Amino acid sequence: MKKIAFTLLLLSATACVPAQNLLVLNADLGHDTISRNIYGHFAEHLGRCIYGGFYVGENNTKIPNRAGVRTDIIEALRKLKVANLRWPGGCFADTYHWKDGIGPKDKRPSMKNVWWGGVTEDNSFGTHDFLNMCEAIGAEPYLAGNVGSGTVQELIDWVNYTNQESGNPMADLRKTNGRDKPWRVRMWGVGNEVWGCGGNMRPEYYANIYRQYATFMTNWGNTNKIFRVASGANGDDYNWTEVLLRDIPHQMIEGVAVHHYSVIDWSKKGPATNFSEEQYFKTMQSALRMEEIVTRHATVMDKYDPAKKIAMVVDEWGGWYDVEPGTNPAFLFQQNTMRDAMIAGATLNTFHNHCDRVRVANIAQCVNVLQSVVLTEGEKMILTPTYHVMEMYNVHQDALMLPVNLKTGDYTFGAQKLPAISASASRDKTGKVHISLVNIDPNHPQEVAISLRGLTAKTAKGRILTSEKVQDYNAFDQPEKIKPLDFKGFTFSGDTLKVTLPPVSVVVLEL
Ligand code: AHR
């Protein structure tokens, strides 16, 4: 009965709800493109992300695989249109020595994964495995270099190994290892979180180190231009960005990173599924801070780089909760609910609306860790609500961002409030306009009156992701509880489109 009532709510525009939210879509004011690279993901040697996640081994006869990588994951990520994939960390990156992960697998040395549980890393998944996997997925690779415990030579060798055609000892070594043509890796991180696990550096010190590394990380006359990303700020550390932009010559930096996770409290993160409304509210409060963080880092960048040549690269973001009960605390394995769908929808809207500066982003991590899009258990694989949001939203990739003005009502919890609605819009290359709307309010539907400026539209179609409760998730025994459905909760009235968003819902409209 409950289910029927819920379905009816989805299918009908609830006429009795007042239009608390007004959105002006400026279809004639598009200027900047939403880079597909905002839809990047992150594969770290952490818990069951690589081993027991992406990679199940070439000799696995139970789980279909291509060179050891699960074919069901490859197919799911191809459909998702994963734009780029960052690897091998995270904190792991600054302990990783890439030469341990090439050549015959039985000859590769093992190491201890010191950041993530002290487990043995046997290096069976290395550079060839990762770059060939990216080719299979259709994602651009983004390699995070080891600055914390590596050397300049080690990183130059990696650049040459992956990028030089010939005439270089590293190109020769690659050929010996069975890959004739270089992969031509464009995106390179120069360390990760060097303010913390990447070396505990001060920004002034790192700016000098960065200059040294970046000097030698060049294309050396090859056709592919390298895109170097400086290890960036921890959340709201605006001084970090200021020092890097001030002290690094701009011809040697293409991107500067920022990391921000949606966390209630680092010492009391709360459960991933059975959370209270208070915990939900606080998570969304942290998630919506991305707007301020991006805006203020952009302001600093504008001061030094008004032409916006340097990209902001939010190469770690997402919800972070307690691990699932009974799982290894160092593996950071968490389920993924409609709360994560809210984080994904609202954060991607922020990135779209700041696409003049935010040109790369990577949600952490792709498989079996934090805000993952795919979870696996033995032979089973499920798609999370976050997967579905990113799939619904991929229509915005490489589309012209259309600015929106939003006057939103509130989601109130006790005496506190948050904006209930988040929105963004774009026009793709075929002329279709897409509007993404999120209603984070778990208790009330929200009506949005969209004024279509500079656009004549009489028909639309839509997709929705929602569920009865914000705590709902896809489980291995109920993998399709949450999935996108057709959405018809809108009506046209002259130049205004009236949309009714059910509680906790993500909607993408196509005009
Ligand atoms: O995503 C988990 C960890 O969070 C990453 O390894 C690190 O970069 C960040 O602190």
Image (spheres, rainbow, N blue to C red):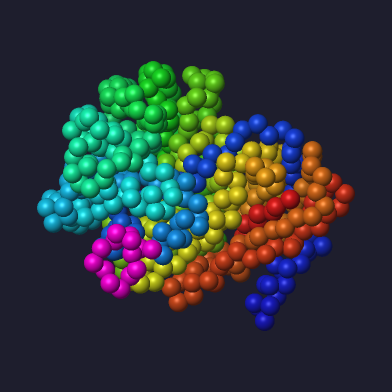
Front residue of 403 and 279: 403
In magenta segment, residue 390? no
Q: Quadrant of the N terminus?
A: bottom right
* Residue at the (61%, 41%) spot, across then down: 399
Residue 270 to residue 316: above or below: below
In magenta segment, residue 59? yes
The quarter of the displayed image where residue 162 is located: top left
Residue 178 to residue 507: above or below: above
User: For the image shown, how many numbered marks are present on the structure?
Assistant: 0
Horizontal and vertical percent for residue 330? 28, 57
Horizontal and vertical percent for residue 249? 39, 18
Front residue of 222 and 255: 222
Front residue of 316 and 130: 130
Horizontal and vertical percent for residue 313? 45, 36
Q: Look at the image and tell me whether residue 263 can be seen.
A: no
Horizontal and vertical percent for residue 336? 47, 62
Residue 241 to residue 355: above or below: above
Q: Is residue 147 left or right of residue 473?
A: left
Q: Look at the image and tell me whether residue 377 can be seen.
A: yes
Q: Farthest right residue?
A: 494
* Residue at the (50%, 55%) spot, across then down: 80
Q: Is residue 347 left or right of residue 200?
A: right
Q: Which residues are magenta?
A: 58-71
* Residue at the (43%, 48%) spot, across then down: 139
User: Which secondary structure class fits the magenta region best?
Assistant: loop
The quarter of the displayed image where residue 70 is located: bottom left
Front residue of 301 and 357: 357
Q: Is residue 339 left or right of residue 115?
A: right
* Residue at the (67%, 48%) spot, across then down: 434
